[in-house]
Amino acid sequence: MSNSGINQLAVDQFSSAERQRFMDRNPKTVALAEQAKQSLYGGVPMHWMSDWSTPVPLFVSHAKDARFYDVDGHEYIDFCLGDTGTMFGHSPDPIAAALARQGNRGLTTMLPGEDAIACGELLSARFGLPYWQVTTTATDANRFVVRWARAVTERSVLLVFDGCYHGTVDDVMVRYKDGQTVPRSGLLGQAYDLTDHSRSIPFNDVDALDAALAQGDVAALLCEPAMTNIGMVLPEPGFMQKCRELTRKYGTLLIIDETHTISTGMGGCTTQWSLDPDFFVVGKPIAGGVPCGVYGCSAQMAEAMQQASAKASAQSSGHGHSGMGTTLSANALTMHCMRTNLEEVMTPAAYDHMLPMAARLAEGFRHLIAKHHLAWSVTELGARCEFQFCATPPKTGAEAEAAFHDDLQMALHLYLINRGILITPFHNMTLCCPHTTESDVDRLISTLDNALTELLAIPGARI
């Protein structure tokens, strides 16, 4: 039994038919999936690519704007958009032109060019922090910022919220359970106890935040301003302001990770909500789909970082390896694409289109939930929204997780895929880009309406 209100047996019956439909309509994908098993572990270049709702991985031919096309020739409206990686559409024309311009002018040199200065100035103007560094992914950016925070504060503990998402940083792979911090389940190859230097508390719990910080050993609170990977969870009014107030009170740094919440609007939640972090991280869409992450810091942090570096160098007989940086970070191709993205793609006009589309989609979800008499809810944040299998929007990661009905979610996703629509896997989140149209939104709503009608028509479907 699930809180979704839908019987598992009905979900199984519904899903079985959709799985067969997928296999029948995608012979080339099925053949490629079989071929891929001979050379790719799990049949995919990254193992999570096999975790979607489809019976075998769906092989893509090409993508442009708000559409992608599979190898069997089917067109899809894309509301996943690379899970934010292509938040402004697939291969925006300015990014395609930037790739062509830079492609024959050098890809990586380990040296800066004028694009680097332009990017720093654009990032400062956009997000309000004066100093910037460039990485290859947001995971790298988070990892490096955590190291800086520990060096600056000379404290070891990292505080995160239960159910957080900050990429694959080891330190964040913890959960909150029965009042204790525990390692996240399913970790492979974990050789040391993460709870020695990481602490997890519930989101939106000011008392838990105060108690965790009051121990005086927390280097930084690393958080998304709204949770996005355990199911969307918005902050209660004033909660993020409490995060800033209490971290300052206890000498803890505040790191805001906006890799997903950048969809909120220009400058992300940091600008929209005046969050004033010590460090700011964003990745995925910042270079228009080209791999890139960045982190910014306040002037006070920049000075503290210089002092920490000087102290480390004075204590070391080596030449000061910091444990940060990779050879391809800030390469010439990436920097040119990021500059182009900030100047021509990630614009106020883009958000002015995306946000109303997402609001239309959220309203459509609410209409469907009411029409089908389901005890579900909708959470929205800027260009992003999600329907969740709970009567009221969750306030913590644990509440969001308790609303999961994985088989139901995957069955609905597969139904949509079989009819040319993709939404974000692993939960029911959608994202609108500057190329998403009203008709795209309406088609998603009408197709989901058909799915629910068919599912609920199965005898005994309702619990």
Image (cartoon, grey):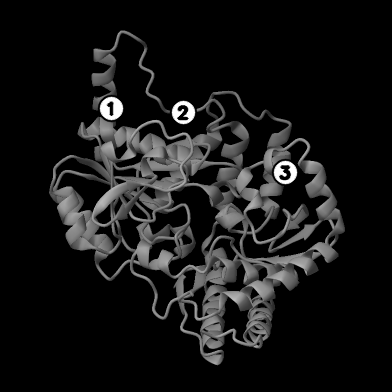
Residue drawn at x 60%, y 48% as measured from the top left? 48
Judging depth in this view, the residue of 151 and 366 nearest the camera is: 366
Question: Along the polypeptide, which appears first: circle 3 or circle 2?
Answer: 3
Extreme residue toward the top, this view: 317
Kindly identify which residue carries mark 3. 43
Q: Is mark 2 on a helix, strand or loop?
A: loop
What's the distance in space between the residues labelled 1 and 2, CA to CA? 16 Å
Give neighbour class at mark 2: few <14, some 14-19, many 20+ (Cα, 10 Å): some
Return the residue nearer the eye: 125 or 433.
Answer: 433
Question: Which tag, 1 or 2, sits closer to the chain's start?
Answer: 1
The reply to whether residue 403 is in sight is: yes
Residue at left offset 51%, top offset 35%: 116
The residue at which mark 1 appears reads as 306
Percent position (x, y) of residue 381?
A: 45, 69
How far across and how far down the image is residue 173, in percent? 39, 45
Cα–Cα gap, marks 3 and 2: 31 Å
Amino acid type at circle 3 is: Gly
Marks 3 and 1, how far apart at CA = 46 Å
Element class at badge 1: helix
Question: Residue visible at 54% across and 68% down?
Answer: 428
Say which residue label 2 marks.
Answer: 325
